[in-house]
Image (cartoon, rainbow, N blue to C red):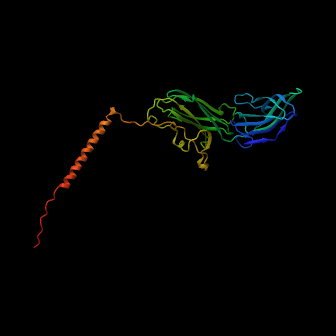
């Protein structure tokens, strides 16, 4: 959703125009982990050029500056150099909302502009609030992320899988069931964890690195893995689907057999990619969104080999014998038919009536 704010002149020399806030949800509401985009124009409204223009952006609430996921203050700076008289330059900035924010908090968007008049060297320096955004959390919601390292491997290679499941809702989540299964590539993991709703608590998230060796008997291709997390007493599910590129293997036709998926109740639905959430409460009459498969499909470029008989395995000799037998049977049938046709029938004795 794009929110367009009215133009705001903050100095006699420069003006901020077309200030927009673009968020995923309605109005100016965002969730932890979502991306917020801010755009605006810096306009020179006087007849002189303005030089050495610098723009600074930050987010503030009750005197507290917003920090990113690493604990550093979110404070981007932009060097616009010069803006000629009557011209403008645009600024675009996007960032991810950090985890450690509270539901309902409103953050002011602060902008500071500095520059120098090219004619009389007078300084331009002003700052003001040009908008705000609100943190909006659902009562039950998880965030799932996963990645392979490396993403391209050969059969038998060592792979690391990084998994993150975080509670971004307003309620604690007990008995979160996490499944990470693709037996084709060689991983089968299950976890049951508790996730606190407080983002500042250590048990607000589950983070783990799994190590495994890719199976030796794969066919080269792309293999999907879906990391699933069922929560809210099993009624809801969050997931992330990623792809492992298996480049080189010793091909063995028909080697990819066996169960490569999760439980049968996880097989319903159409395949999907990326991240998402779903509602599995069918007893309450809620259809929810259709779930992706567990990501254990065969590689997209896999074409099974068709075995054929070679001269060494006796296939040609067997064929020759069969042809001889068929020919002899046909010859016998022809002889019998000829005999029946040329055989003279016995004369029938005359009948006398008295």
Residue 140 drawn above or below residue 219? below
In the rendered view of the protein, which quadrant contains the C terminus?
Answer: bottom left
Res. 17 in view? yes
Residue extending farthest to the front is 342
* Viewer-closest of 38 and 279: 38
For this rendering, which residue is in front, 228 or 120? 120
Q: Position of residue 33 (x, y in %)?
A: 68, 35
Q: Measuring 87% from the left and 31% from the top, which residue is drawn there?
A: 48
Residue 54 x/y as whole percent = 80, 28
Along the line of sight, the residue nearer the viewer: 310 or 141 = 310
Q: How many marks?
A: 0
Residue at 27% from the left image edge and 39% from the top image edge: 321
> Which residue is farthest left?
354
Answer whether residue 104 is visible to the viewer in this image.
no
Residue 176 location (% of width, % of height)? 60, 37
Q: Residue at x 31, y 39 (%)?
A: 319
Q: Is residue 175 left or right of residue 353?
A: right
Q: Position of residue 15 (x, y in %)?
A: 84, 35
Q: Is residue 230 left or right of residue 104?
A: left
Image quarter of the N terminus: top right
Choose between 85 and 162: the one closer to the eye.
Answer: 85
Which picture quadrant has residue 266? top right
């Amino acid at each position: 959703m794009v929110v367009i704010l009215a133009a705001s002149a903050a100095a006699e020399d420069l003006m901020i125009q077309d200030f927009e806030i673009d968020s995923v949800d309605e109005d100016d509401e965002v969730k932890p982990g979502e991306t917020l985009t801010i755009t605006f124009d810096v306009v020179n409204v006087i007849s002189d050029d303005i030089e050495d223009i610098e723009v600074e952006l930050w987010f503030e609430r009750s005197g507290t500056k917003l920090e990113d996921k690493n604990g550093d203050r979110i404070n981007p700076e932009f060097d616009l150099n010069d803006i000629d008289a009557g011209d403008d330059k645009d600024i675009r900035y996007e960032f991810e909302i950090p985890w450690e924010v509270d539901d309902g908090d409103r953050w002011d968007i602060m902008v500071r502009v500095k520059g120098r008049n090219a004619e009389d060297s007078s300084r331009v320096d002003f700052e003001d609030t040009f908008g705000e955004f609100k943190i909006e959390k659902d009562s039950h919601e998880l965030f799932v992320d996963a990645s392979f390292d490396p993403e391209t491997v050969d059969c038998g290679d060592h792979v690391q899988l990084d998994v993150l499941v975080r509670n971004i809702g307003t309620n604690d989540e007990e008995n979160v069931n996490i499944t990470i299964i693709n037996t084709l590539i060689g991983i089968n993991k299950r976890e049951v964890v508790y996730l606190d709703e407080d983002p500042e608590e250590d048990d607000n998230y589950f983070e783990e690195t799994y190590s495994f060796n890719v199976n030796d008997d794969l066919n080269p291709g792309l293999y999907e893995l879906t990391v699933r997390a069922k929560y809210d007493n099993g009624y809801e599910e969050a997931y992330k689907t990623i792809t492992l590129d298996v480049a080189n293997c010793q091909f063995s036709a028909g080697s990819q057999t066996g169960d490569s998926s999760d439980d049968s109740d996880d097989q319903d639905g159409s395949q999907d990619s990326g991240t998402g959430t779903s509602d599995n409460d069918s007893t309450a009459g809620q259809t929810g969104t259709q779930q992706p498969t567990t990501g254990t499909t065969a590689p997209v470029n896999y074409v099974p080999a068709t075995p054929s008989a070679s001269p060494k395995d006796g296939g040609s000799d067997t064929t020759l014998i069969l042809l001889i037998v068929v020919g002899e049977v046909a010859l016998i049938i022809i002889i019998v038919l000829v005999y029946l046709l040329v055989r003279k029938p016995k004369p029938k004795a005359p009948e006398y009536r008295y």
